[in-house]
Image (tube, coloured by chain):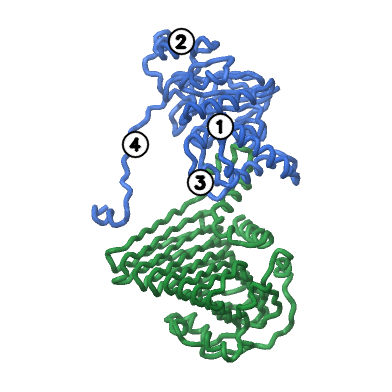
Chain colours: A blue, B green
Amino acid sequence: MSTLIIKNLHAEVEEKEILKGVNLEIKGGETHAIMGPNGTGKSTLASVIMGHPKYTVTQGEILLDGKNVLEMAVDERARAGLFLGMQNPAEVPGVTNSDFIKTAINSRMEEGKSVSLFKFIRDYDKAVTELKMSEDLPHRYLNEGFSGGEKKRNEILQMKMLKPKLAILDEIDSGLDVDALKIVGENITKMKNKDLGLLLITHYQRLLDYIKADRVHVMMKGQIVKSGDYSIIERIDAEGYDWIKDELGIDDVRVIVEEEEERVVLGVCATKEALDL
Amino acid sequence: MVNYELTPLMNNDIPNEITSFLTKDLTNYVIIKDGHIIAKSLEEDFNKVYIDSYEHAIPDKINVFLDSEFVNEYNDDAYTYNIENVNSGLLIHIPKNQVITKTLHVFYIQESIDLVNNTRIILEDNSEFKYFEYLYNVNPSSVNFVSNSIVRENAKLDYSGISKLNEKALFSITRNSYVSRYGQSNYSVAEVNDSNTDSKTNIYLNEKYASGTTKTVAITSNHQEARFTQLVEHLAPETEGYIENYGVSNHNSVLVFEGIGKINKYMKRSIARQSNKGIVLSKNARLDANPLLLIDEFDVEASHGAAIGKIDDDQLYYLMSRGLTLKTAERLIINGFLSPVLKKLTTDELKEDFVLSVENKTQ
């Protein structure tokens, strides 16, 4: 059984502090959910745990079974048992899904050893069927030309194949229609066991209808401001977040204020010439 | 051909690197060393196809190859040198209506001479042919390689290749293709040389509805300098040309892609498209892509694009977040990037050779 402990975690991006002291403990077998309005640092927390190079940790620690996660490179964290189901997984042209997962499984094995091809294909096909994905998936390029829903299901498929100790699913429900949400929810519930720790990050309670959460946390201003059981979700569902803001006297919950993106005009050279750019 | 002189052969040995490809999976091959055919193995599919070196060309066939149509007039120094000093070459003639689905593999080996090769491939009306070439040198030398393909009405040529000359060679290569009505000419070549290289691929769409594609994958390393020029010239209306380049430059090397889509006046409803993609692996490496569209007609479709940069950080992070080491992740991304040519290789040994060459050059 694994335990992930996060203590007083502070992190910043481009010298702007996003996480302002997060404390969280997840034990194997438990399912936690983090909810909260947009821009409160939920996804940042997920990325920092996985080790995205964009973020700098300024204070605090993350421990997985007592080992200091912050000292590990991204790939070491993965091999130690962490998994992040991403909100926007990258597209990698030319690399097939099956090659990628095979390589990922082999990276967890001793040097020189590799997974039996027969077992791999059997497991992979089973996962594809359970997630109701198309049969040509193994030969398609990684996430290239996938719909939003397909990308999300592909994340769950990878989780099935890699069997992590602790999985974080970052807004795995966004972009899924009701049927797909049900499939994903059922598959995740099926994976639950006494060893797997789960952290679900979501805006809506929809996902939590399918996956039962043991603990619910609400994040605002880069901190976990409220923790409790499922009853919190019911109240958020009915009343929104205002009651928590009132309770805590917070007005603006956001730490990430999206700046209006600068408009860029893309065009062919001819337009550039015509516009004298 | 102005002059043709063969140097006597020193020995019949096939270098070990080439022998390793000759497995049972590799059917239909010709090995030509310093201008002499030293091994040949063909299945009956090729019974009606004429494949031989110049010295053995039978008199009534030689005219098919040596007529001056298209190929002897070309304003280029390396080319002029080639046709004046040929000492190696292969003649391949696919008769009318012959459709051959299997690939012919030709291994060109330089051993004891400065190789000046001129290969000619002629596809008569309605024929189809798949050709693969592997260029290899044993000793320091200059290699001047020319191949001309003549693709007649409704014929289809698939031309693929790997060139793998070492850093002791100086390499100049010109591949020309002349395409007639409804003809198709598709080139995909992998340039994994360590030599300084000047490579040209020219596709001339001579008649209506002809089409041509040229895909080049090139990797440069160390102090290598390499230039790849692709030209598709539309000499008839309603012709289609596609240029695709994939490059990786490493260490202190310089890689230049020049892609030229040229649509002449009155060649209406022609299509010229071009894309260039590149990855630069070290801060001293250089990769230039100069996509050119020379268009002298209004009623056409044309596009070009170039995207060059380092390996995508998001892709790396994604692969590593699944446990792949940085090195494995980079290797997977680069191999994926170069897959358009990898797909063309027929046997596992050739694929492995290509992948290993890429790995050696991208370390």
Q: Secondary structure at mark 1?
A: strand
Q: Are marks 3 and 2 on the same chain?
A: no
Give, as a three-letter code, the residue at label 1.
Answer: Gly
Q: Is residue A20 above or below residue B125?
A: above
**What is the count of numbered marks?**
4
For the residues carrying marks 4 and 2, which lies nearer the camera in this image?
Answer: 2
Between A187 and B304, the residue placed more toward the observer is: A187
Give, as a three-letter code, the residue at label 3.
Answer: Asp
Q: Are marks 3 and 4 on the same chain?
A: no
Distance from disc 4 to disc 2, alpha carbons, whole Å, reads 35 Å
Give, as a three-letter code, the residue at label 2.
Answer: Arg
Q: Where does label 4 land, which residue?
A: A261
Circle 4 packing at 10 Å, graded few (<14), some (14-19), many (20+), is few
Distance from disc 1 to disc 3, alpha carbons, whole Å, reads 19 Å
Relative side of B175 to B272, left or right: right
Residue drawn at x 52%, y 83% as measured from the top left: B82
Tell me the tag on residue A85: 1
Q: Are marks 4 and 1 in contact (CB under 8 Å)?
A: no
Q: Where does label 2 land, which residue?
A: A235
Q: Secondary structure at mark 2?
A: helix
Q: Secondary structure at mark 4?
A: loop
Residue drawn at x 56%, y 46% as measured from the top left: A140
